[in-house]
Amino acid sequence: MHIISRKALRAFWQKHPDSKTALARWYKIVSNTDFDSFDELRTTFSSADKVGELVVFNIGGNKYRLIASIHFNRHKMYVRHILSHAEYDRGDWKK
């Protein structure tokens, strides 16, 4: 999948250095795999959930959440938000 944008990942792990290993691992897996459907994605990321049109990934043992918009037909993934679990629970990202 083509991930847009890796810059968001780098910015987040500069702010939260303990997330770097988990985000780099997630990036490597996603960028080297072409998922054709949400069901295929779930075979690799069993904890991924659909929230409306977005997909939420648990990162770093559920410490962080990565929210993405995925276009399976074009093999593109847009990183919309990367949040701590507490920020995610507040729900501000849904607005």
Image (tube, rainbow, N blue to C red):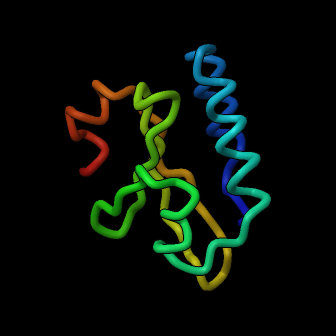
Residue situated in front as seen by the camera: 3 or 95: 3
Residue situated in front as seen by the camera: 70 or 32: 32
State the image coordinates of residue 15 (x, y, percent, origin top left). 58, 16
State the image coordinates of residue 50 (x, y, percent, origin top left). 34, 63
State the image coordinates of residue 63 (x, y, percent, origin top left). 42, 25
Q: What residue sits 46% from the left and 28% below the top?
A: 61
Q: In this rendering, is residue 50 above or below 19?
A: below
Determine whether, in the image, residue 70 is placed left or right of residue 56.
right
State the image coordinates of residue 71 (x, y, percent, origin top left). 56, 75
Q: In this rendering, is residue 25 above or below 36?
A: above
Q: What residue sits 62% from the left and 30% below the top?
A: 22
> Quadrant of residue 14 in the image?
top right
Residue situated in front as seen by the camera: 25 or 11: 25
Determine whether, in the image, residue 16 is placed left or right of residue 93.
right
Q: In this rendering, is residue 52 above or below 20?
A: below
Instruction: In the displayed orientation, state which residue is furthest to the left.
Output: 90
Q: Quadrant of the N terminus?
A: bottom right
